Image (cartoon, helix red, strand yellow):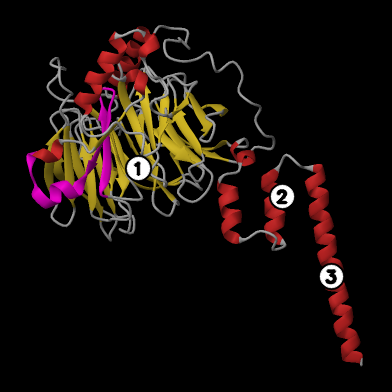
Amino acid sequence: MVLAFDAVEVAHKKGALEGRRNENISSLMMTEKKDKAVIDICRREVGHLSTRKFARRLANSEDLVLKLDLARKLQKHLGCVNTVSFNAYGDIVVSGSDDRRVVLWDWETGCIKLSFNSGHNNNIFHAKIMPETDDRSIVTCAADGQVRLAAILECGNVETKLLGRHKGRAHKLANEPMSPQVFYTCGEDGLVQHFDLRTRKATELFTCQPVRGRYFTPVVHLNAIAIDPLNPNLFVIAGSDEFTRLYDIRRYTYDASAAFGKPVDHFCPEHLLGNENVGITGVAFSNQSELLISYSEEFIYLFSKDMGWGSNINSVLDDHHHLTANSESEIDTDSKPGPQVFKGHRNCMTVKGVSFFGANEYVVSGSDCGRMFIWKKKDAKLIRVMDADKQVVNCIKPHPRTLMLASCGIDWDIKIWTPTALEKASPPVNISRLGPGTNHWMVSPRDMAIELLAMRSQQMSPERGPNGE
């Protein structure tokens, strides 16, 4: 009887405790309705929210996005920082700079884990830690056109090796998801190369050709490349014209023919078809195979995979030219669904990337005005604008596991952004009027370009040394 009574009493106390917890949650929901992230944390603590659903909600939490704040500056480079990214786990940041050095950081403490000379003869444009290599293999490309591998030895020394070369600047590389061996590069020579670190040899896949009638340039100067995470056989490239081209590597694998240079699909907003005055600086895939494209002197666009124009783009351009030659009343504007458009930033001066953020529910980009822009992917609503550089923000990369960002640009540091602000940021105002052709700054773009060139010349002067030491 005593044991039975004790069991009843324990059950009663447990029920009372559970009741008080529920009351606390209800009270919290009444008093802090707008802070959904806090509510979700409490619901997770008492078992009312599964781990998976909690993680997804936290990664997508607009409340946390509105609390993003500058947490730390990583300072070592002696030049503009052109590239920043996380390793697969997210505890290390790798950066590359005009000083031609690669630095690995413990971003939480701000300590440098390793700094080394890349072997490049000019500004580093992209550096990535290859996955599944214990963070010991780093691939880089640069303004000297070289593609290099840095191998970190057990003793801590670094060996660098030339893997391949472009004729002109090589802006971007893309590694095959979860592959420690395979990656691609693209350059201003229009060449796309495939690398396999098991052979340490470059395979020249093709040179990107302009569409018919563009006789003023023999190649498309490439700025961007990305691999579809859902289907690593597919990759896109983009550069000095209006098209993002989609390729399937299996076509090259099976026949190794020159016909592989023909894309399987083309992506471009309809109003930019035939526009020879625009180019593309950044592309990115979501984990649902959605495609982000950032245009220079224009906006950012989000495409689903069924929004392409197909492989025969010359025929599409012929039809478009015929339609636009007729009166507007004859054009069927509802014939093709258009992509989502993200406005507010300015992209004219440098080669800027674009990224998905927060479980792919947000879009983030830098700007010529020195600010970082964050939009909601679903409705393209601009929700954050943050000062992130004294001049230009070029690169923003999300953490692979949590809601935080790393950014870099003309400043000589890397900035780490975490949701640690005490108060949520207010909505941006008077941003919609800023767009193509809008001048943000106190000096003209020409004067700004001259100033940036002068800064680069000064930082690479003999007094500082070519490697920033």
Q: Position of residue 209 (x, y in %)?
A: 15, 28
Q: CA distance from mark 2 to mark 3?
A: 21 Å
Asked if residue 37 lies left or right of residue 70, the reply is right
Vertical position of residue 375 compared to residue 232: above or below: above
Label 3 vs 1, first from the N-terminus = 3
- State the image coordinates of residue 413 (x, y, percent, origin top left): 43, 32
Amino acid tagged 1: Val
Q: Which quarter of the rendering shows the C terminus?
A: top left
Q: Residue visible at 85% across and 84% down?
A: 7
Determine the secondary structure under disc 2.
helix
**Residue range (magenta):** 233-258
Residue 280 in the image, given as x and y percentages of width and height? 31, 25
Indicate which disc residue 39 carries.
2
**Residue 103: mark:** 1
User: Residue 36 — which label?
Assistant: none
| Residue at left offset 30%, top offset 30% | 98
Q: Are marks 3 and 1 in contact (CB under 8 Å)?
A: no
Instruction: From this view, report whether residue 452 is shown above or below residue 203.
Output: above
Above or below, 176 relative to 213? below
Q: Are marks 1 and 2 in contact (CB under 8 Å)?
A: no
Judged from the image, the secondary structure of the residue bearing numbered disc 3 is helix
Identify the residue position indicated by label 3 in the image: 15
178 magenta-colored = no
Residue 169 is drawn in which quadrant? top left
